[in-house]
Image (cartoon, rainbow, N blue to C red):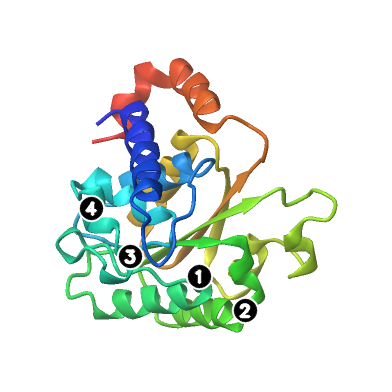
Amino acid sequence: MSMRAALHQVRDAGEELLRLSARPYPLPIQGLEAVIAGGFLGVEKKDWVVPGLRERAGAVLRGCSTQRLVDGLAGARPYKVAPITESPSARMLHACGLAMACRHQDQAVLCFIGQGSASYGAFHEALNLASLHHLRVIFLAHSFNLDAEGSPLSRQIAGALSGHAMAYGVQARTVDGGLITEVLSAVTDARAAGGPRLIDARLLRGEDPLARAYDELTETEPHEANLIS
């Protein structure tokens, strides 16, 4: 599957879930297409994914129907997509539990979180747990306008998400969350490295995410086959 097709498929799935009044409540995914698609494509289908309300739309990239995703609390077990958890920080602990329960050493767990998760204690508990047990879990965080005046993040925590991760011994990487190639490369590298990793995908509001992604893909299409198997 091409990255361009993946972006479209994720956006279409998100819009369909809105029309179907997904439960527990639907949320738009505009602006997160590159993060969601890059995350799902960066791990293997044998790996577990722990999504949020928005990120569940990425399960269509594993062949899951949008109808199957309407009830987010049910999950999509055949596709290794865990039931959603409204609390992103609790989601991180669930991802750690899945990583500890994985029977095969070559399995990884991808967990989507938002910037607000860092203001909860479970965020720090999960990073500490992942580091202590060297869990093969990838925390893919998306954050908006980190450096903007009045940014919600600046009122919740001191420092960047990556800094908090590294304080617990979790390797961290910051990428442009609007570019699918950057997200995909970071997730792929994190999976190959093993052990816990945090990826901070930074985003800007007010941009047309697909238009920007297409501009990027127009420049990189000759190399696209090397990034997606």
Is residue 142 shown left or right of residue 19?
right
Question: Height in image: 20 above or below 120?
Answer: above
Q: Residue 204 location in percent, x, y?
A: 66, 40
Q: Residue 2 location in percent, x, y?
A: 29, 28
**Front residue (pair 147, 107):** 147
Q: Nearer the viewer, mark 4 or mark 1?
A: 4
Q: Residues within 10 Å of mark 3 (few under 14, many from 20)?
A: many
Q: Residues within 10 Å of mark 4 (few under 14, many from 20)?
A: few
**Front residue (pair 63, 107):** 63
Does the CB distance between marks 4 and 1 fall below 8 Å?
no
Question: Height in image: 4 above or below 197?
Answer: above
State the residue at coordinates (64%, 63%). 161
What amino acid is found at the position of numbered circle 3 in the picture? Gly
Q: Which residue is mark 4?
A: 67
State the residue at coordinates (43%, 67%). 196
User: Residue lying farthest right?
Assistant: 149
Which secondary structure, mark 2?
A: loop
Q: Which residue is mark 2?
A: 120
Is residue 223 shown left or right of residue 28?
left
Which secondary structure, mark 3?
A: helix
Q: CA distance from mark 2 to mark 1?
A: 9 Å
Question: Height in image: 4 above or below 25?
Answer: above
Q: Nearer the viewer, mark 2 or mark 3?
A: 3
What amino acid is found at the position of numbered circle 1 in the picture? Pro
Q: Nearer the viewer, mark 1 or mark 3?
A: 3
Give the mark, 3 or 4, whose residue is nearer the N terminus.
Answer: 4
Q: Residues within 10 Å of mark 2 (few under 14, many from 20)?
A: some
